[in-house]
Every structure is written in structure tokens, then in C-alpha cells.
Amino acid sequence: GLFGNKGWKPAWRDPAPKAEYDAIIIGGGGHGLSTAYYLAKNHGMTNIAVLEKGYLGSGNIGRNTTIVRANYFLPGNSEFYSHSLKLWEGLELDLNYNVMHSQRGLINLFHSDGQRDAFARRGNMMINQGDDAILLDREGVREMLPFLDFEQTRFPIYGGLYHPRGGTARHDAVAWGYARGADRRGVDLIQNCEVTGIDVEGGRVTGVQTTRGAIKAKKVGIVVAGRSSQVAAMAGMRLPIESHILQAFVTEGLKPVIDHVISFGMGHFYISQSDKGGLVFGGDLDFYASYASRGNLPMVEHVMEAGMTLMPMIGRAKVLRSWGGIMDMSPDGSPIIDRTPVDGLFIDCGWNYGGFKAVPASGWCMAHLMATGESHPVAARFKLNRFATGHVIDEEGTGSQHN
Ligand code: FAD
């Protein structure tokens, strides 16, 4: 603005791909960029490239509703998301980049005795994990969120599970911060470079085919979120992943009115207010598999109805935009960070509705795996073969539905 938008220098280089790297990351979303950053920073691997078919941040990292929390219940998820939240708390200092991490507090509402019991248990697990949780009764919620409809009798508000360290962060700034950090450590970030094939010889990965030519590497990480099944198929793998659309909505800018993240317990609806003033909200998946980055009207209607039930004042706000992203849904709602049957080929996927909050820990653990060949302790249960062995981490319904 003050400089007439002139003289800005690009925040990262635009290198041509080299013929060979020590490691390649496929996918320049949040997880791919954080993997590259921690490979360079924690493991000294700098002769690496991130290959992105579009532009950095064009996928789900720039499409999510920005909620960051550590309120998971099951061992496996619990320690992983707890680790991630701690990384979030130091991220701006680490990256020297303002990702607008705002710990404004998250409140999951409950509407029955049974739901209260489930949330009380969850809160105890969060506290056992070393994170924070406070069980609010109805009056406690009313004090914090007086604008909710406490009179409606269909889904009466019984209380809420309050997670004060939960909140939001600016999604694309997270991609930009990791991108700049990785670039400064020597990582090549190569945009408009789609991976079209994965080269495997004698059970070992040897490189990839791309729209910008063949590139060799002895280590390759697939980190492509909604496109995971398609890219893994290039190496002959069939993943336990389905791709579905998740939509989100933003209203015109309003004066500050909602200063927490709130999720409804009896329908799919959650909401926060962005720093620009827009009410940002969303709901559940469009329930059919799809690779289109936009959704359909039945889910729009469902989300609006749930919003009106919870806080009728939202009916006065005008919706400015809606969009969708392609989610990599795993059968148990939990992610995969693991080796594959192909030597040197690693995969990070299955983030479902909730992979934004996971960006720091996912990159941290995927980098650890790619550099050392061993799973990081906080991601040790995110195995690909758990669906064959039965060691699932079944937390889809209660964990990830609140984004
Ligand atoms: P992406 O940004 O999608 O990165 C994958 C990249 O791979 C893309 O840039 C894509 O172009 C690239 N790619 C694909 N195929 C190829 C190829 N062949 N060659 C090269 N590159 C390729 N999570 C939360 O924690 N909190 C939330 O509040 C939340 N809300 C959400 C709301 C919506 C509407 C959506 C869509 C998602 C939400 N999520 C949320 C989930 C979260 O955004 C995702 O789980 C996470 O961003 C996925 O990881 P990523 O950032 O690496 O994905």
C-alpha cells in the first residue's frame, strides 16, 4: 500500500528442477511444505525438492476453516495433536513469520446427558495428555456466548467443553511461512510441476515423472491430501482412502461478535470470526466421493439450518463466498504417516476434515520418518497396515467432525 505495491521481492525462489535430489516431496500443501522445512531444519537434508502441480497453497491448506486444537481422545491421536499444538505455540518465532495464531478458545457444545458424559471423558483425556479442558455448564456457556439461542427446546444447550488453548491461525500464511523457511534453507520449491508417474525398480523408488521432466531421487514422500489415492496408484498401491468434498462459507465482514470457535453438538456446524470480520463456518462432507473442489446445495442447506438453530442472529448476515476442498478420508478418521511396500517411498495422508491443525506435527514426523527410516514416537500408531491388522484408531465421529 504505502509503497504502491512496488519493490516487493518474491518470498522464495523459482528454481528449475534439477535432474536429481536426495529426496522429493510430492505436494506443496501445508504438510508437504512443513515436511520439507523440518527435513532441512531438523535433519540437515537440503538437497530436496517440493513438487507442486499448481501453486503453493492452492489446495486444502488455503481452503480450510483454520481451526487449531488438541482435544482428541484416543491414544495415537492424543499425543500427536498435543505435540502439534505445542509446535503451533512456537511457530511464529521459529518461522519468523506472522501466521496469526490466535488461541481464542474452542467450545464444543453438548445437548444431552449422554453427550455431557462423553465430553467429560474427553476432557479428562485431554488433561491426562497435559492439555487443557474445562467442562462448562449451561450458565457457563451463556456467560461466554450470550448470543446463542438458549430458549429453543429442540436441541437445548446443556453446556460445553472449553479448550482455552484451541483457536485459529491464518491458513495461507502457514503455507507461506513454511515455504519461505524451507526455501531459505535451500529447498527447491517447484510450482506448476505435476507428478505423473512414480519410477520403481526392483521394489525401490528411483524417481518421478513430471510435466517438467523426469527427476531422480532415492526417497520420495507422497503428501497430496485429496489426491492421495491417485498418486499412490502411480506406484501400484491401492489406499484405504476415499476423497470427498468439504465445503465452507464466509459472510461479509462484521464488527467483532464471536470471539471463540464454537461447534454445535446436534448438527454439523462450527463457526469462528476471521480477523477481517467475516463469520467463517462449515459443516459435514458432501456424502459422495468426488474430485471436484466445490460442493452442492443439500449440504449448504443443512449447514445454514444448523447455524440458524444455534444462533438465529446469523440469519442477518450475508454469505459472501462458499468453496470446497478435497478431503482424504480414512476409514477410522485418523491419518497415515508411514513407509509403503516400495522401498524409499513414504506416505502422509488420511487427514480427513482435520489436517490443518496437524500441519506442524505431520511435517515434523514425516521428516523424521523420511530422514531416519523410523516412525516418530508421537506418530508411531499411524501405520498403513492398521486396517489389515485391526489396530484402528477409530475417532472419526467425535474427533475430527469438529474440524
Ligand atoms: P493440500 O493443501 O491440499 O496439499 C496437497 C497438494 O498436493 C495440493 O497443493 C495439490 O495441488 C498437490 N498435488 C496433488 N496431486 C499432485 C501431483 N500429482 N503432483 C504434484 N502436486 C500434486 N483442518 C483443520 O485442522 N481445521 C479446520 O478448521 C479445517 N477446516 C477445513 C475446511 C475445509 C472446507 C476443508 C476443505 C478442509 C479443512 N480442514 C481443516 C482440513 C485441512 O485443510 C486438510 O486436512 C489439510 O490442509 C490437508 O493437507 P495439505 O495442507 O497438505 O493439503
Image (spheres, rainbow, N blue to C red):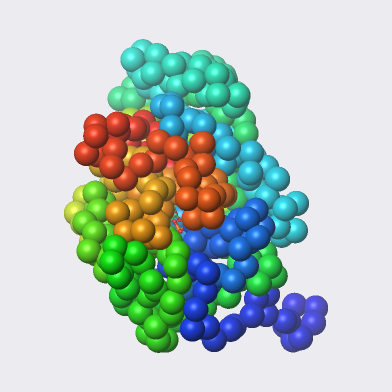
> Is 155 above or below relative to 60?
above
* Ligand 1 shown in quarter: bottom left
In the image, what residue occupies the spot 70% across and 57% down?
Answer: 95
Q: Where, by quadrant of the figure, is residue 40 drawn?
A: bottom right
- State left or right for residue 76 relative to residue 22: left
Asked whether residue 236 appears in the rendered view, the answer is yes
Percent x, y of residue 14: 59, 83
Query: In front here: 50 or 95?
Result: 50
- Quadrant of residue 163 in the image? top right
Residue occupying the point 67% across, 42% down: 89
Q: Residue furthest front?
A: 202
Residue 150's x, y, as percent?
45, 24
Name the foreground residue: 182 vs 60: 182
Viewer can see residue 327: no
Would you place residue 71 above or below residue 314 in this image? above
Which residue occupies the extreme left position in the image? 288
Whole-percent x, y for residue 243 in the image: 27, 56
Quadrant where the image shows the C terminus: top left
Q: Residue at 49% across / 83% down in the picture?
A: 19
66 in relation to 400, above or below: below
**Residue at 40% of width from left, 14% of height from top?**
117
Quadrant in which the N terminus is drawn? bottom right
Q: Which one is nearer the viewer's eye here, 275 or 68? A: 68
Q: In the picture provided, is 348 more to the left or to the right than 389?
A: right
Disc count in the image?
0
Q: Looking at the image, which is closer to me, 93 or 144?
A: 93
Q: Position of residue 282 (x, y in %)?
A: 40, 48
